[in-house]
Amino acid sequence: MEVFSITCLSQPCVMGIIFLIAGTIMYFFPPKSINNWYGYRTQQSQSSQAKWDFAQNYSTKWLIGGGLFAIICGFVLPYFGIISPKEETYSVVIIAILILVPTFWITEQKLKEIKD
């Protein structure tokens, strides 16, 4: 009988921890002015200070939530045999897409609603 042998350091968990840390840092220490080095940087978010401030706050919440989602996936998927260790790399790519595409899409849609 196989004993539960999942480790916290599965690839999706590591990615989730990185997203969680990055989102938390950006949430508590957001860039105060528009720059090309740090923060949620798209053409639309850099078009005005109001959009910049909104994008920094809004996108970090999605990034933190996505990090938690990836950590949960990192435990659940291997535990239930949905992915094998050989498939972890593919699952990281899929999970990253499931996190980042909605983060960018929804943030950009919300930025369009903000008047300059």
Image (cartoon, rainbow, N blue to C red):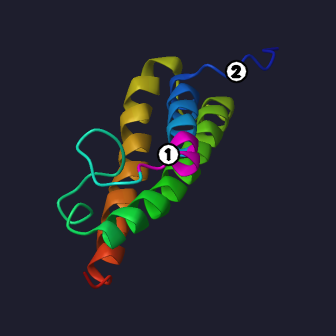
Secondary structure under the numbered disc 1 in the rendered image: helix
Callout 2 amino acid: Ile
Location of the N terminus (image quadrant)? top right
Per the picture, the main secondary structure of the magenta-coloured stretch is: helix
Q: Residue 62 carries which label?
A: none
- Boundaries of the magenta span: 24-31
Q: Which residue is drawn at 54% across and 40% down?
A: 25
Secondary structure under the numbered disc 2 in the rendered image: loop
Question: In the visual, does 37 lie left or right of 70?
Answer: left
Q: Does the magenta stretch include residue 55?
A: no
Q: Which residue is drawn at 55% across and 50% down?
A: 27
- The residue under label 1 is 26
Question: Residue 9 lies in what quarter of the image?
Answer: top right
The residue carrying pointer 1 sits among few (fewer than 14), some (14 to 19) or many (20 or more) residues within 10 Å by Cα, namely many
**Up-down relation of residue 93 to residue 105 (above or below):** above
Camera-nearest residue between 44 and 14:
44
Percent coordinates x, y for residue 101 in the rendering = 33, 55
Callout 1 amino acid: Met
Question: Residue 33 lies in what quarter of the image?
Answer: bottom left
- The residue under label 2 is 6
Q: Which residue is drawn at 25% across and 81% down?
A: 116
Camera-nearest residue between 31 and 77:
31
Question: In the visual, does 5 lie left or right of 115?
Answer: right
**Up-down relation of residue 62 to residue 3 (above or below):** below
